[in-house]
Image: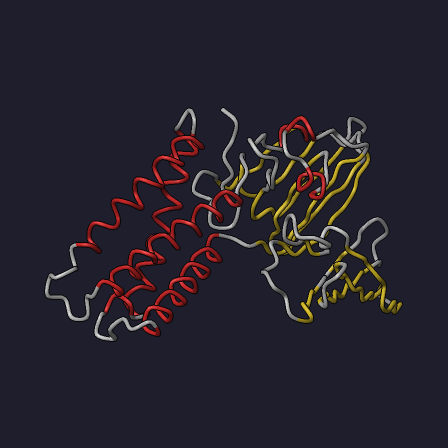
Amino acid sequence: MTSGRRGTAGWVHVGHWAVRIRPHDGGLDVTTRTAPAAYAMRTVSRWAADAEDPGLLILSPTTEPVGTWPWPLPRVGIHVALPRDVDTGEWFGLGPGEAYSGTTAAVRVGRFTACVDDLKTPYVLPQENGNRRQVRYARLSSAHRSGLVIIASPHLDLTVRPWTSEDLAAAQHTTDLRPCDQVYVNLDAAQQGILAAAVVAVLGNAVVAVLAHAAGASEDFDPLHLSVYAPLTVFGVVLGAIGWAVVRRAAKNPAGLLRWLVSVLVVVSFAPDLSLLGGGTPGSGSLAVAALMAMHVVVAAVVVAAYRRVLPLPVH
C-alpha cells in the first residue's frame, strides 16, 4: 500500500488489484497494483509470503512507482486493521514519543509499552501523528494477549491509531475524529522527511536564480550561483528545523510564536542582502539583490510547509 498527498482530489479514493498470484513450495508470491482515481499513475507491489511455519507470515514487499507522479510519496508501506479490543502496544525501537525521518533528536532506542490511545498525539489541526521510528519488534495485543507480533528486518516505522489516515485528512478539528470499531496500523518501509524539504528549497531557489538571470541579473553576482546558494539553503532548512523543534517543545503557544518569529526572521534576513547594494560586490544590482531576498522567502515558505507536516504543533 502507498499513502499519498493529503487533500488531493481523487487520491484518497484508491483501488487495489491482485495482478498475479503464484503459489510455490515455500509459500505464495502476489503482485498487486494500487492506483488513485483520475491520475495516470500507479504503484506495482510484489509480496513474497513464506508459509512454512504455521502462524508466521514473512512478507518481503517491493514497490515500484509507475507513470509520472506530480508529488513525492509521503510513505510506502502496509496498512493493517485489527480488532478494537487490541489496546496495548509494545515495541523495541525509538521512543517513547513520536518521531519522523530527520526528527529523532528527542527519542532513544529502547523497549517501550503504551496504551493504543496514548500512541496518538492531539494536534491543533488533525494530521499525521504518532509515528514510531526504527521499530525492530512490536506486539499489539488485547487483554487476552491475542493480537499481532511484528518482527522487522532491519526495522520499520510503526503507527497505531483508532482512525485511518483518510479520517485524519478529512477532519478539521480534533472533535471531528471519532474512534472507529477497529485499530489501524501503518507499517512503513519509507517515509518522506526533512531531506525532501532541503531538496525542494534548493530547487525553488534554482528557479529564482534562473528567472533572475533571464530578467537581466548579472552572472557576476556570486550569491546567485548554485555552488553558493545551495549549501546556504540547506543550512537554512536545518537551522529552521532546530528552531521549529525548540519552539514546538518549549513555547506555551508555539503556533502564535512561530507566526511572529518566522516573519521577523525573514525581514531581518533581508538586511545583509540590502547592504550589498552599492557596496562594491560584482553584479550586485537591484534585480540580483531582490532575487537573493526572494530566496529567503522561498526557504521560509518551504520550511513552514514541511515542518507543519513533519513536526506538527501540539495542543498545550
**Splitting the image into 4 quarters, where does residue 246 fall?**
top left
Q: Is residue 8 left or right of residue 180?
A: left
- Residue 14: x percent and y percent? 77, 55
- Visible residue check, residue 215: yes
Q: Does residue 238 lie above or below 47 as drawn?
A: above
Residue 22, by quadrant, is bottom right
Q: x and y percent of residue 76 in the render?
A: 65, 56
In the rendered view, does 87 fall on the left or right side of 267?
A: right
What residue is at 74 percent from the left and 65 percent from the top?
Answer: 45
Whether residue 24 is visible here, answered yes or no, is no
Where 71 falls versus 105 (above or below)?
Answer: below
Kindly identify the residue that appears in the image at 34 percent across and 64 percent down: 230
For the rendered model, the colour scheme is: secondary structure
Question: Could you say where residue 30 lies in the image, as x and y percent from the top left?
Answer: 82, 65
Q: Residue furthest left?
A: 280
Number of numbered discs visible in the structure rendering = 0
Q: Nearer the viewer, residue 258 or 216?
A: 216
Quadrant (top left/top right/bottom left/bottom right) for the N terminus: bottom right
What residue is shown at x 86% (from left), y 51% (from top)? 54
Which image quarter: residue 2? bottom right
229 horizontally vs 153: left or right = left
Q: Residue 20's spot in the image, x, y percent? A: 86, 69
